[in-house]
Amino acid sequence: MHIIQQLLFILCSGIAVFFFAKKVAEIRRNINLGRDEDITDNPSARWKNMILLALGQKKMFKRPVAAFLHLAVYAGFIIINLEILEIFLDGILGKHRLFAPMLGNLYPFLIGFFEVLAVLVLTACVIFLIRRNILKLRRLNMPELNGWPKSDANIILTTEIILMGLFLTMNTIDLVLQSRGVEHYTQTASFWITGNFTWLYSNLSTATLIGIERTCWWLHILGIFLFLNYLPFSKHLHIILAFPNAYYGKLIPQGEIKNMPDIQNEVLYMMEPDKAPPATDAQPEHHRFGAKDIQDLSWKNLLDAYSCTECGRCTAVCPANMTGKKLSPRKIMMDTRDRMEEVGKNIDVNKTFQDDGKSLLNDYITTEELRACTTCQACVEACPVSIDPLSIITQLRRNLVMEDSNAPQEWNMMFGNIENNMAPWKFSPDDRDKWVEELAG
Amino acid sequence: MAEYAASGETPEVLFWVGCAGSFDQRAQKVTKAFATILDKVGIKFAILGKEEMCTGDPARRAGNEFLFQMMAYNNIHTLNGYGIKKVVTICPHCFNIFKNEYPALGGNYEVMHHTTFLQQLINDGRVRIKEGGAFKGKKITYHDSCYLGRGNNIYDAPREVLAALDIELVEMKRCRSNGMCCGAGGAQMFKEEEAGTTRVNFERANQAMETGASIVAVNCPFCTTMLTDGIKNKEKEDSVAVMDIAEMVVASLA
């Protein structure tokens, strides 16, 4: 009997890892659809950011309630994984509570600690569900979340509750079976939480209990395998990508916009023609100004999109969004990911990307949204995992203005004024220092 | 600046006035206030005068990189031609361009925003504030501009200047790195807002008025305009004033 369970387990884990790896490769390919961007500078500052922001969750604490609950789930997730290691080895080797003899008195202490975490995770997830579905927090109930994103969030929370429930039930029954001296159930001291609930099952027969315990064990580990494979399809992928994303986050001041060297050179050659390289017959590589689709964005922009867990801290502080405009930085990230997935599927089917007549700009993100941005960087500052929605917005704006000459009339007037009067307003350049006379007079 | 160059003298600092400071009537008052302080302290400063041009900030943020590069080329040409090393400006947008975006184009200057400059002058004892000045004990709130605050992490210098004026600083709920935009950045100053439930400047002005402060201290000519309009919208312009920190300092000089 045990050997069949072991073989079955090895098969299940193999399948789970295979499909996960396949999806990871696909995501990697999609991220690499983006423009190349060298982000290898200053590794020590980057490691520091990763440790503070991803591991230490520094920016989460701007909202203390959510931060505490999130920390509980996060710590629970990471630390309970140690227990999963034991369960995994149990599955392969058929040796129950493998670590118990090695760790001695420490073992019940550790399991007790995991149980406390499991209860914290369970409670936090219930509170999260309440915040989303009953209290209806504004930032978790905005129009861009309708449909799949809301279901995604509820699936994640429910799954975690179920997994924790199974873990706790499994331990409780394990204790009952231990007390009856059933073979295979290694003797340990009582566990902190489940030790208080053994009475729940004391009336059931040993065979029934073994049945329930095994079912819980299998559902728990299969649930974990399924959850692993659910991750890449879900916003929950942030639990992995938060780390690289924080590492590759912007180190330069937030106010800085990336230079466009090709346009810089074009202006230089125009002003100083002697510096221009000699004309050749070679056709310059086709190259878009700004970004129209995901391939024009940098790979970091695309990594940002996959790292986003749609928490909406960016949108909650966006002045445009707060005052009822259509712009939502979170939607910018969600649209980028959706379009990236669409392009990825196109490549899966056609080997290389075949023009589908769509683009991120216009089909996903509208000019109205882009125009409403004040470039105030509140969204960049708010993101706990160093996502930069503003970078995508400014690149799309560049495309609108430079390739489509699509700017509101007032902006065209402003451009004209800068060009002709060297100021965004229609004043005579001769009056620029008029204030000096007024001050002297 | 041309006059300094002609006489072979070098000024201590170049005062980059900016378009708003040069042309906008309200911002001109800030320009004059800051120039008065510099004069009074005896700092040898120059302006480019008619040679100054828009830095290109609104063009770049609207997406018109070509126009930005043209302006940048011309300005850097002028500044490098005069051998300018140190720049001070009353506009956080110009400040950000000088500090973060001109270096990539060959324009390397030590640049300071006027609030940092004033803070240093006060710390060095070059600017002396009179005891029991006009703002002593007054309830004043301070609005962080995006490009000074989040953009460049300057939160304390302006607050230290305010502290030197002996005011009672009442912070808005959204301040410092969580400060809310006035609505002018990203070239919004030059166009109508998109359709929404309210205007950004109305919202921010309301937040400022909720503190009960009689003065909203600012550091940016665009914030000044936006918040003033927001206060007028609530017809509170008689009880709540919007003042640049330079204006507050000039009124408090010993």
Image (cartoon, rainbow, N blue to C red):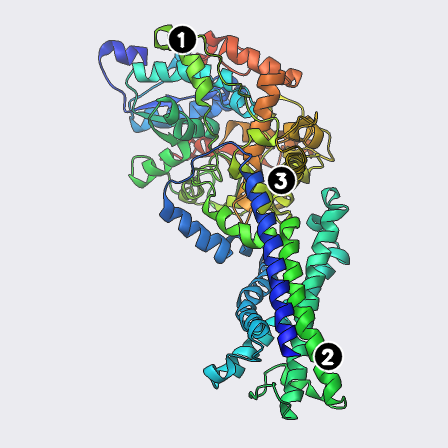
At numbered mark 1, what does the secondary structure look like: helix, strand or loop?
Answer: helix
Query: Looking at the picture, which amino acid does disc 2 mark?
Result: Ile
Question: Residue at label 3?
Answer: A333
Location of residue A122 by image quarter: bottom right
Badge 2: chain ID: A
Q: Nearer the viewer, residue B64 or B137?
A: B64
Badge 1: chain ID: A
Q: CA distance from mark 3 to mark 1?
A: 39 Å
Marked residue nearer the N-terminal end (3 or 1): 1
Identified at 57% across, 52% down, the residue is A21
Query: 10 Å neighbourhood of mark 1: few (<14), some, or many (≥20)?
Result: some
Q: Position of residue B200 (x, y in %)?
A: 65, 34
Marked residue nearer the N-terminal end (1 or 2): 2
Q: Is residue A169 above or below residue A227?
A: below
Res A219 visible: yes
Question: Residue at label 2?
Answer: A212
Query: Looking at the picture, which amino acid does disc 3 mark?
Result: Met
In this view, the mark in front (1 or 2): 2
What label sits on residue A271 in the rendered view? 1
At numbered mark 2, what does the secondary structure look like: helix, strand or loop?
Answer: helix
Quarter of the figure that contains the C terminus of chain B: top left
Q: Is residue B251 above or below residue A428?
A: below
